[in-house]
Amino acid sequence: MTLLVKPLKIQPKNLLIWNEDDAMSRHTPVMAQEVVEYLKLSPGMVIVDCTVGEGGHSEGILRKITPDGHLIGIDQDDDALSITRLRLSQFEGSFTLVENNFQNIRDVIAAVGRDAMDGVVFDLGVSMMQLGSPERGFSFQADGPLNMRMDKKGQITAFDLVNNLSEEEIANIIYRFGEERYSRRIAAAIVAERSRHAIATTQQLAGIVIDAMPRHERYKKIHPATRTFMALRIAVNRELEVLQTGLREAIDLLKSGGRICVISFHSLEDRIVKNEFKAQARDGRVRIITKKPLIPTDAEMESNRKSRSAKLRVAEKI
Ligand SMILES: C[S@@+](CC[C@H](N)C(=O)[O-])C[C@H]1O[C@@H](n2cnc3c(N)ncnc32)[C@H](O)[C@@H]1O
């Protein structure tokens, strides 16, 4: 297990690699108001942000729990932690950032000398910084190596999956995690292409996916490679598996009356959250606060496209 409290590694000028303008204004946290409200924050609380990213939710939380409160921010991406450390510098002493996978939340909490928390938030998926950094290989919008690891020390990349798995295994990943109806055609095209040369870049893969699609599917609003890329990202980072473990552990570590807020961005994630909350409610461990998931306001969806698929579920420890 890796458990590191990271020193600042990248300087502000390096942040310009992934976007224009000012680093502090780049990532707009989704449903930030709702998260702050539903966590019922007050000064002195201990809150864990399991997906600290660029620190948007963490900043809003720190405003409410300081003085005396403490935020523990977890992310498996050390670039994200470096950005957040800068962003939160005004709260120095009131937060601890930890590079780790949230499935290890129990070890993280213990390592920072705590044994329970007043609230926890998960804002799942990939960040704008990750998507906007071509060298991280998450996006087909710009060319980059087929990587897709949120944890840069992770063992498996998208390159490994695409170039080494059997046709059936690739089709299953694309179908299960991307809910892509053309998974078999795409897998066959990938295997045909890689028999000539390795598939090494995001745009190479995107091109193969587009060519494998029936003509009428190629010009839709959503890019034809979206579901395939999402599926590979989920597989590389074992996103669904770690989510299940992370949720269970987080609920276990909540104090009575403490709340868990989870923002998900696709149906597979949301189903896991819904089912876990239901199971825990049946066992008398939590009370579900949001019978139906909350969605962003029209204004937020208008101003932040990424928020459109967001769903927020909240439960309270009994
Ligand atoms: C959507 S972003 C979070 C954005 C953040 N809430 C903000 O306002 O800036 C998701 C972040 O969670 C991290 N992440 C995803 N899965 C993780 C996991 N299993 N363990 C730790 N971090 C994870 C990603 O690296 C990414 O930085």
Image (tube, grey):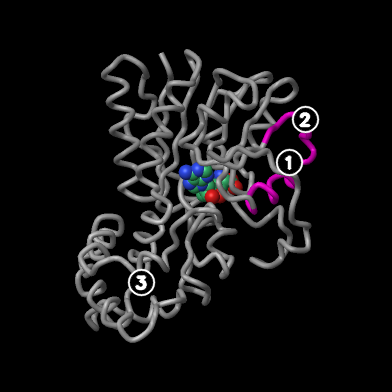
Counting residues from the start of the chain, the first of labels 3 and 2 encountered is 2
Say whether residue 167 is left or right of residue 39.
left
Question: Would you name the residue on which mark 2 appears?
Answer: 93
Asked whether disc 3 touches disc 1, contact meaning CB atoms under 8 Å apart, the reply is no
Count all numbered tags in the image, as a single digit: 3
Front residue of 225/42: it is: 225
* Residue at which label 1 appears: 88
Question: Secondary structure under badge 3?
Answer: helix
In the image: residue 256, left or right of residue 118: left
Callout 2 amino acid: Gly
- Find the magenta span and give its range: 79-96
**Which residue is under mark 3?**
163
Please state which of the two labelled residues, at mark 3 or mark 2, is closer to the viewer. Answer: 3
Residue 111 visible within the image:
yes
Q: Badge 1, how many Cα within 10 Å: few under 14, some, many 20+?
A: some
Q: Is residue 148 left or right of residue 274?
A: right
Residue furthest bottom as drawn: 196
Q: Secondary structure of the magenta portion, mostly?
A: helix
Query: Is ligand 1 less than 8 Å from the beta carbon at label 3?
Result: no
Asked whether residue 31 appears in the rendered view, the answer is: no
